[in-house]
Image (cartoon, helix red, strand yellow):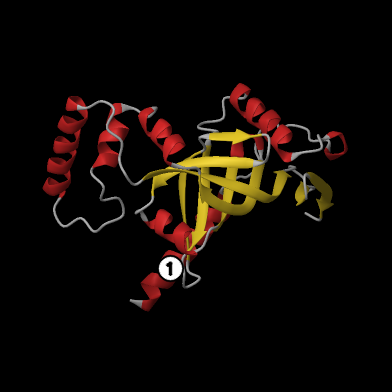
Amino acid sequence: MAEDHQANEVSIRALLRSLPVFTGELPAFDAAATPADPVSLFAAWLASAIDGEVPEPHAMTLSTVDGHGQPSARVLICRAVDGTGRWYFASSATSRKGRELGANPHAALTFYWPKQGRQIRIRGTVAPTGAERSAADFLARSPASRAESLTGRQSDILDDPAEAAAALQAATAALAADPGLVAPDWTLYALTAADAEFWQADEHRRHTRLRYERAGPAWRRHLLWP
């Protein structure tokens, strides 16, 4: 049995090492010509990703830590970004990420666009934006997404898939009867960035890393070693 596990490990390692990285033509990145704030650079990179047909460029990884210091991560959609350096996302406050943010509001966001060899890593403090904005975000979602959220059981243990189907059917009916219904735990969050790093891959491994750090109302910029 141990030999089988070792053989599998060797096979997977060989498979992973055979996969190419940073293929295709990567965009240029002149760190000396970047804007004074990370939001402007994020907007430019996002536009480039959209123009370059990067799949789901608004998808990002949200990393949180619970009250015991145990991390978890998941991919979700960036809802908005504003000029003050806040990135927005939404979730149930009673979900695992919602509970973790309630216990420890520090979090990180990661965007990864392999087609362009680009990463954006953002760290900061997360806070709810309030009931009015959360309700507006909820009502802007698709009917299917709202019905799913109205079941109110995200991250709970599911013993029987039929139970989830019945809950979704009931939520869909409730939404049809009252299209303005809002899940009470739905929350629009804002992560206020303390720092943001822009990482551009290079096929010769001469990667460029530019970090912005908040300094009061302004930002400091500096390059990092690859």
Given residues 8 and 178, the one toward you in this image is: 178
Q: Would you identify the image quadrant in which residue 25 lies?
A: top right
Report the residue at 36% width, 29% height from top: 139
For the C terminus, give its image quadrant: bottom right
Is residue 112 visible in the rendered structure shown here? no
Given residues 39 and 127, the one toward you in this image is: 127
Is residue 99 visible in the rendered structure shown here? yes
Q: Is residue 137 left or right of residue 106?
A: left
- The residue lying furthest to the top in this view is 51
- The residue that label 1 is drawn on is 7
Q: Is residue 60 left or right of residue 183?
A: right
- Residue 98 lies, in percent from the top left, at 41, 54
Q: Is residue 105 above or below residue 166?
A: below
Q: Element at badge 1?
A: helix
Q: Amino acid at mark 1?
A: Ala
- Residue 205 lies, in percent from the top left, at 76, 49
Report the residue at 45% width, 59% height from top: 102
Given residues 62 and 23, the one toward you in this image is: 62
Report the residue at 15% width, 41% height from top: 165
- Residue 116 lies, in percent from the top left, at 65, 35
Q: Is residue 125 above or below residue 150?
A: below
